[in-house]
Amino acid sequence: MRWRSYCWILRFTQDDGFLDLSVFIRIIRGQKAFPRAISTCSVCAVPAPKLIIFDCDSTLSAIEGIDELARVRGPKVFAEVEAMTAAAMEGKIAVEDVFAKRLAIIQPRRADVAAVGRQYVERVEPTALATIAQLKAAGWTPLILSGGFRQIIEPLAAHLGIARIEAVDLYFNASGDYTGFDAKFPTTRSGGKPERIAELKRELAPARTVMVGDGVSDLETKPVVDLFVGYGRYTERAKVKAGAHAFIHSLADLPALLEK
Ligand SMILES: [Mg+2]
């Protein structure tokens, strides 16, 4: 970086006559100190994001993507996979115990990805689009953090205006047949969502972090967020409701909740 760039950064971080040396150092180290949507820290005039992180399945949309992938393979496969998904979301079995197994049974094809992607949009939570627009206008940066699959979620994220998806990649060969998934991604295992949020917080240094979701894997994020909001429109889980800081049945309730 040239000396003129350093001077520009120094001037920027001296806004209102206050130099924040930590921000200056982070920028010259190449860290992302100024993400897309920002608010302003009242103490030092340093922009800091407010993150609102959404679970996807049974939160932003009525469906469970993995179950819909299974439905394509017929009722027997659907019933088997749905039972495993429900048990994992209830916290009765570990996510990692069913993750690879469900996909091995289903053997999803690339064509199925597009079909289920359309279902996510068709069955979107009815207040999600307006609520996310309202939250963005209020300075919140929405993200999706899911144990589902990135390629399938992309149409829904685009529909809702959510730029960043944290989810599992599926792999296919040239013929469109299933060859595997990103087994290293944290949400393929129990405890993966708080692990990924901790990484996001190190990357984005948010002023506030909120998580919204319906499952036990979402509730696990409570220790690493400022507010965990349980969601019960599609499935009301007693464990999530009991453990959440707040529990809602419509995403439209979020803006008022976040003003408190
Ligand atoms: Mg969910």
Image (tube, rainbow, N blue to C red):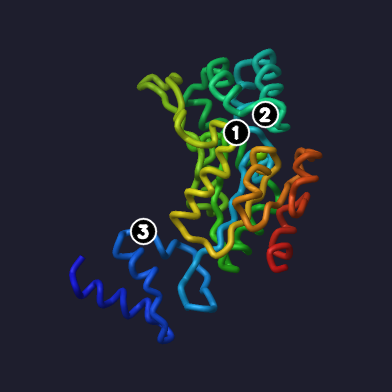
Within 10 Å of disc 3 (Cα), the crowding (few <14, some 14-19, many 20+) is some
Secondary element type, mark 2: helix
Instruction: Estimate the spatial distance between the alpha carbons at disc 1 and disc 2, rounded to whole Å.
Output: 9 Å
The amino acid on which the numbered mark 1 sits, given as a three-letter code, is Ser
Q: Which residue is mark 3?
A: 31
Q: Quadrant of the C terminus?
A: bottom right
Q: Which residue is mark 2?
A: 88
Quadrant of residue 93 in the image?
top right
Residue 38: horizontal and vertical position, in percent? 50, 67
- Residue farthest left in this picture: 2
Ligand 1 within 8 Å of disc 2? The answer is no
The amino acid on which the numbered mark 2 sits, given as a three-letter code, is Ala
Instruction: Estimate the spatial distance between the alpha carbons at disc 3 and disc 1, rounded to whole Å.
Output: 28 Å
The quadrant where ligand 1 appears is: top right
Left or right side of 86 for 7: left
Q: Quadrant of the N terminus?
A: bottom left
Residue 41: horizontal and vertical position, in percent? 52, 74
Secondary element type, mark 1: loop
- Residue farthest top in this picture: 76
Residue 144: horizontal and vertical position, in percent? 55, 47
Within 10 Å of disc 1 (Cα), the crowding (few <14, some 14-19, many 20+) is many
**Mark 1 vs mark 2: in front:** 1
Do the CB atoms of the residues marked 3 and 1 lie less than 8 Å apart? Answer: no
Q: Which residue is drawn at the image coordinates 35% and 77% (left, top)?
A: 12
Q: Looking at the image, is mark 2 or mark 3 earlier in the sequence?
A: 3
Q: Which residue is drawn at the image coordinates 50% and 45% (left, top)?
A: 165
Q: Which residue is mark 1?
A: 190
Q: Which residue is drawn at the image coordinates 44% and 55% (left, top)?
A: 203
Q: Looking at the image, is mark 3 or mark 1 earlier in the sequence?
A: 3
The amino acid on which the numbered mark 3 sits, given as a three-letter code, is Gln
